[in-house]
Amino acid sequence: MRPNSVVLPVLLVTLGMVFTQTGASFAKMLFPLVGPAGATAMRLTLAALVLIAVFRPWRQRLDGRQWRAVLLYGGAMGAMNLFFYAALEHIPLGIAVALEFTGPLAVALFGARKPLDFFWIGLAVAGFALLLPWGEASDHISPIGIVLALCAGACWAGYIIFGQRAGTGGGPHIAALGVGTAAVIALPFGLATAGTALFDPALLPLGLAIALLSSAIPYALDMVALPHIPARLFGILMSGQPAFAALSGLVLLHETLAAPQIAGIAAIMAASIGATLTIARRNKPKIA
């Protein structure tokens, strides 16, 4: 990979987003068999086994402070996934991801003071309002699903904050431990709702595909791409997640969205891109 070329890293990040949302669509297919909590537990457990086998975190020594950070990071990840998959039972994938995206957007705009910051906040709020079940076109949008997706967004905010703390001075083994912690948290909920169906060998191929698509492969692609791509560009690319989610929901789950809902998703994406550009410009180091 040429040092100055960002084409391949951009393609890798984009491919990772496609895998992530495809995995979410496949996970929703598991709901009739094991429920949302069961699908969450299966995805995180299998992903943890893959990441632990690859990165072998037992070779690293962590002090008490690092372990606390890892546990908070993994706890936020586990809760985020449980809430998100529960939301998918009630609302389309594209809307769930857009609502969940309010979490990282809130982190990005925390402490906003500039007029432009409040414009992005207003745009995000307008997008959120368009996703609410106001009229007949939104009859299939459950208020419960909206609340669950927003809870997932709050956990995503915690995931970002605790993940930064856990990752300081760490490496891939931190992610493996975090996913392992999330799996431990999700597994009791999966067992409570799915029971022995969680261990059905017939579901293992689909469960492994979900784990690879939603966690292991996107993480590996990001690991390759991130050293070669500016943080600002990565943030802009990640803002496309709701669009990929809506497309995946349409193609794989046959979920259709009304025009106001598409506009709401676009508004949240625009607010995320705008906030990313604004923050990057503000934090750009000055040359003496």
Image: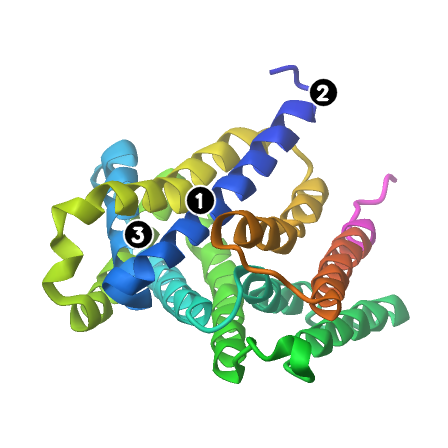
Outermost residue, left side: 196
- The amino acid type found where label 3 is placed reads Arg
Using a 10 Å C-alpha cutoff, classify the residue at mark 1 as few (fewer than 14 neighbours), some (14 to 19) or many (20 or more): few
**Residue 73, position in %: x, y?**
39, 60
Q: Is residue 254 left or right of residue 117?
A: left
- The amino acid type found where label 2 is placed reads Asn
Stretch of the chain drawn in magenta? 280-288
- Cα distance, mark 3 to mark 2? 36 Å
**Residue 132, position in %: x, y?**
65, 79
Using a 10 Å C-alpha cutoff, classify the residue at mark 3 as few (fewer than 14 neighbours), some (14 to 19) or many (20 or more): many
Q: Magenta segment, principal secondary structure?
A: loop
- The amino acid type found where label 1 is placed reads Gly
- Image quadrant in which the N terminus is located: top right
Residue under label 1: 169
Could you tell me which residue is drawn at 33 percent across and 45 percent down?
211
Residue 4, which numbered label? Answer: 2
Using a 10 Å C-alpha cutoff, classify the residue at mark 2 as few (fewer than 14 neighbours), some (14 to 19) or many (20 or more): few
Q: Is residue 158 left or right of residue 268?
A: left
Could you tell me which residue is drawn at 52 percent across and 38 percent down?
16
Quadrant of residue 66 within the rendered picture: bottom left
Residue under label 3: 43
Marked residue nearer the N-terminal end (2 or 1): 2
Q: Nearer the viewer, residue 84 or 245?
A: 245
- Cα distance, mark 1 to mark 3? 27 Å
Could you tell me which residue is drawn at 28 percent across and 32 percent down?
54
